Amino acid sequence: MNIPVITIDGPTASGKGTIAALVARALGDWHVLDSGALYRLTALACRRAGVSGDDPEQAARLARELDVCFGDGVWLDGEEVSEAIRQEAVGNLASRVAAYPAVREALLARQQAFRRVPGLVADGRDMGTVVFPDAQLKVFLVASAQARAERRYKQLLEKGISANIRDLLEDLQARDARDTGRQAAPLKPAHGARILDSSELSIEETVQQILTWYGNAG
Ligand code: C5P
């Protein structure tokens, strides 16, 4: 059976997670894959095991052996880590270990297993290019670096975390450069992807555009 998939790829903080969850709900509670969380969990497992970001073999071993559970929050080795994986340091380490082909290979089948009825909305960097190349609709969601830094800044403030917008902007740009410049599954629009620039769009408008495209694509 060809279970439908919508992929939403794009750079850091382009709003993929929020949009994916809303699109999934609008389609009647489709499943959601936040693939970045798997890279973040691998990074967290590395930190906890004392494995550095320079050791692809050990990072891949930890990725293969990840004991994770998604449901009400994200769990690693029986511990709730939803907040811990969102730390900037974990995100940075995630983008380093994600550059290793062995780590990506170790997480591939785990990501594909999220494809279950009635359908899946998968967000990340290589959902349309590598993980679900046969997706019914592929979206490449972008927003200017300034718009993304401002959104992240607001999110952090809402959580009571102080931040500096210039540091956030530099961090985003460094991560964009690493994600687009790497050899393994670099961030780029998949063949046939629709490009959606959300810099000037509301969340509602962005979701609506994807649903309209899916209606036309389906
Ligand atoms: O999307 P998020 O910021 O949570 O992802 C963390 C890091 O994981 C990204 O910076 C990226 O390097 C990596 N990643 C990836 N491929 C994916 C999802 C995330 O390489 N499909």
Image (spheres, grey):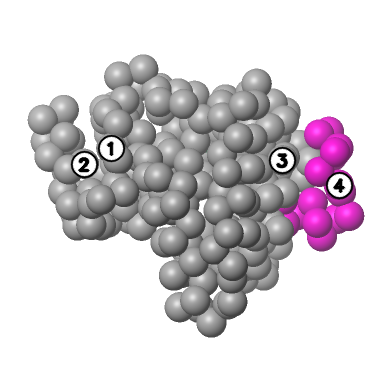
Instruction: Specify few, some or many for label 4: CA neighbours under 10 Å numbering under 14, 14-19, or 20 or more.
Output: some
Residue identifier under label 1: 196
Report the disc number at residue 210.
2
Q: Amino acid at mark 2?
A: Ile
Residue identifier under label 3: 96
Mark 2: which secondary structure? helix
Instruction: Specify few, some or many for label 3: CA neighbours under 10 Å numbering under 14, 14-19, or 20 or more.
Output: some
Mark 3: which secondary structure? helix
Question: Of callouts 1 and 4, which one flags the residue occurring earlier in the amino acid sequence?
Answer: 4
Note whether ligand 1 is within 8 Å of mark 1: no
The residue located at (39%, 54%) in the rendering is 147
Tell me the distance, in whole angstroms, between the alpha carbons under discs 2 and 3. 30 Å
42 lies above or below 126: below
Mark 1: which secondary structure? strand
The residue located at (29%, 47%) in the rendering is 198
Tell me the distance, in whole angstroms, between the alpha carbons under discs 2 and 1. 9 Å
Instruction: Specify few, some or many for label 1: CA neighbours under 10 Å numbering under 14, 14-19, or 20 or more.
Output: some
Q: Position of residue 68 (x, y in %)?
A: 62, 55
Tell me the distance, in whole angstroms, between the alpha carbons under discs 2 and 4. 39 Å
Report the disc number at residue 170.
none
Task: Looking at this view, name the residue that lies furthest to the front.
Answer: 166
Q: Amino acid at mark 1?
A: Leu
State if disc 4 and disc 2 touch (CB < 8 Å).
Answer: no
Magenta stretch in the rendered image: 43-58
Residue identifier under label 4: 52
State if disc 3 and disc 2 touch (CB < 8 Å).
Answer: no
Q: Amino acid at mark 3?
A: Arg
Note whether ligand 1 is within 8 Å of mark 3: yes
Q: Amino acid at mark 4?
A: Ser
